[in-house]
Image (tube, helix red, strand yellow):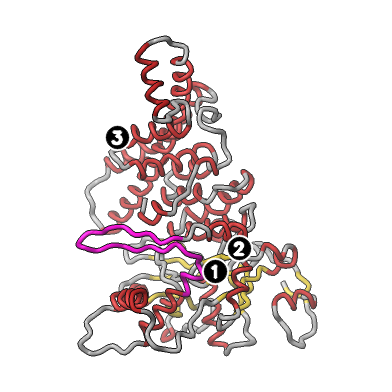
Amino acid sequence: MSKREAFHNDDSSRRLPMYPPGLRRNYGSNGVWDGELDQSKFFNKLAATALDLYDSAPLSTVKDGLERLRTIGQLRSMLEAAEANIMADSFEMYTREATNQGTQEALIDQQDVQDAHFSASCYGVNFSDDVTIRSSFVAEASVALRDTVGRVSAKLFTAEGLRNVCTNTLTALSNGEITTKAAREIVRQSQDLDPSDIKQLEYVLIPLAKTATDSVVSQRARRMHERLHPKPIEDRHKEARAGRAITWWKDVDGMATLQAYLPAEDVISIINTVNWFAAHEEVEEEDQRTERQRRADLFRDVILDGWPETSGTPLKSRIAVTIPAIEMLTNPKRGLAELEGYGPIPMEVALKIAKDAPSILRVLTDPWTGAVIDVARNKYRPSKALRDLLRWRDIQCRFPGCNKLAEESEADHIDGWAKGGHTSRTNTQLLCKRHQLFKHALGWEVIYKPDGSVQWRTPHGMVCLEVPGSVSTVENFDFARNPTPTLPVVEMTARLRHVLGWHDDEPEERAS
C-alpha cells in the first residue's frame, strides 16, 4: 500500500454487496465436495505450471527467457488467487469460531474468563464485534505472511471481494490470465455497485485485463465505476470536497513530502500554472537545476514568498466534453465531462470552469467501444484536427505500459513517412520521445489493426496488443475473437446534428 493510499483509502468490504462475515455462503457450502473442487481449481494448474518450469532445460535464447518470465508471471497470479481464496475462507472460519466462542464463554462461570471479559469491557472491546475479529485475524495473518498490518488488511479486502463478489475475476486470476493488480482494481471499483453492474464491470474488464497493462485496466475500471455508480457524481464530488486536506510525512535524508487532497480541477490548474511559469522563466547559464527541481523550487517560493510579479498565466484547465451520440440522445444526464489529464468529472464542475478554458472540444465516440472516432473540425485546420483526434482517441502514449499523457507525447507514423506512410488517423499514434526511440532505433515493431488496436512486437518476438485509451470495452474488437458488428443505420436528423455540433447547410443524409 502506498503512502497516498494510506492517507486516502476508504476501501471497505461493507461497500461490497455480500453477506457479513460468518454468514457467507461460498465457504463450505457443499462440504468436502466443494473443498475438493477448490483444491483442484486453485492448485492443480499451479502445480503443473511450476513443474513445467522445474523440468525446463537451461536457457538457450533471450526469447526463451522472456517466455519463462511470462510463465512466472502467470504462476504468480495463480499463487495470489490461491492466497486470496485461503485468506477469505480462513477469515470466514475465524469469524464463526470467534462468534461461537464468545457465546460459549458467556455461559462459563470461570474466574479467568470473567477477568478477560472485565478487561475487555474496560477497554471497550467486544469479542464478537466485527472490527475486533477482523483486527485479530489481520494481526495473525500478518505474522504468518511476515507483512505489515496495512498491506494484509488490503489483501483481505481484495480476497473477500474475489471470493464472494467478483468470482469471474478470481477464476481468471487462478488461471494466470490476469495480474493481481488488475484483479485488485476490479474489486476496488466494484464498491457501491449493484451485483448486476459488477457483472457488467467484469464482463468488460476481464477480456481487457488479459492483454492490457495494469494501468490501462485501472483507468477503464475507474471510468466504468463512475458511470455505473448509483449515486450521481455531482453528489459524490460535493461530499468528497469536504475531505480536502493537506498532509505531510517525514522522509529520509532531511526531506519530507507534502500532499494536498483537493478537487481535481484545482490540482490540474495548480500543476498547469507551475509548469507554465517554470517553462517561461529565464534560466541563467550557470543554473544547473533540472526541470523537476525548478518546478519544485517554484512551488516552494510561491507558498512561502508569493507569486512573482506578473500578470499571471493564461493556462487553465481545458475541458473536453465527450459526446457518445446515442447515449446522449437517450439519456443526456448520464454524460460526463472529461478533465484533460485527469478523467471524468461532474458536468456541473466542468461548466463552472469552462468559461476560463481556452476551448471546449466536441468529441464523438463509438457507442459500442467508447473509442474516439472524430473531433470537431470546424474550428481547426486539418492537421490540428488530427492532433486533437489523437489526443482524445489515444489519451496517452500507446507504448505498452506507458502512462505519459498526450502533452508529453507526439504524433508518430506507424509506417514511416520515408517508406510511404501517410499522415492519417490509421497510420498515426501518440508516442512519447522515449518510446519513439524504442520503435525507430531499438527494433520494436508496431502494426495497426483494422479494429483500432495496435500490435507491438519486441525484438525477441514477444507480442502485446494495445487499444486506444478512449476505448471502454474490447468485446467487439477483432483480437478478442468477436468481429466488430455492422453499425446500424442512423438517420442524421436535425436534432442529432445539433447535438453533435454539425451546424452546416448540408442536407440530411443517412450514415452507418
Residue at point 30%, 33% (across, down): 144
Q: Within the magenta stretch, is there residue 250?
A: yes
Q: Within the magenta stretch, is there residue 409?
A: no
Q: Distance between the residues labelled 3 and 1?
A: 48 Å
Q: Position of residue 455 (x, y in %)?
A: 45, 66
Q: Position of residue 497 (x, y in %)?
A: 74, 78
- Helix, strand or loop at mark 1: loop
Q: Nearer the viewer, residue 348 or 33?
A: 348
Q: Where is residue 398 in the image (x, y as percent from the top left)?
A: 44, 69
Q: Residues within 10 Å of mark 2 (few under 14, many from 20)?
A: some
Judge whether 299 appears above or below 38 on screen.
below
> On the image, numbered disc 1 is attached to which residue?
452
Tag 3 and tag 2, C-beta contact below 8 Å = no
**Badge 3 or badge 2: first in the primary sequence:** 3
Which quarter shows the C terminus?
bottom right
Judge whether 256 appears above or below 506 on screen.
above
Q: Position of residue 247 (x, y in %)?
A: 38, 59
Q: Which mark is residue 369?
A: 2
Q: Which amino acid does label 2 sit on?
A: Thr
Question: Toward which corner of the image does residue 358 lie, by quadrant?
Answer: bottom right
Q: Nearer the viewer, residue 482 or 436?
A: 436
> On the image, numbered disc 3 is attached to which residue?
143
**Badge 1 or badge 2: first in the primary sequence:** 2
Q: How crowded is mark 3: few (under 14 residues within 10 Å), some or many (20 or more)?
A: few
Judge whether 18 appears above or below 446 on screen.
above
Residue 188 appears in view: yes
Q: Give the range drawn in magenta.
A: 245-269
Q: Nearer the viewer, residue 287 or 337?
A: 287
Q: Which of 370 and 42 is in front in this view?
A: 370
Q: Distance between the residues labelled 3 and 2?
A: 45 Å
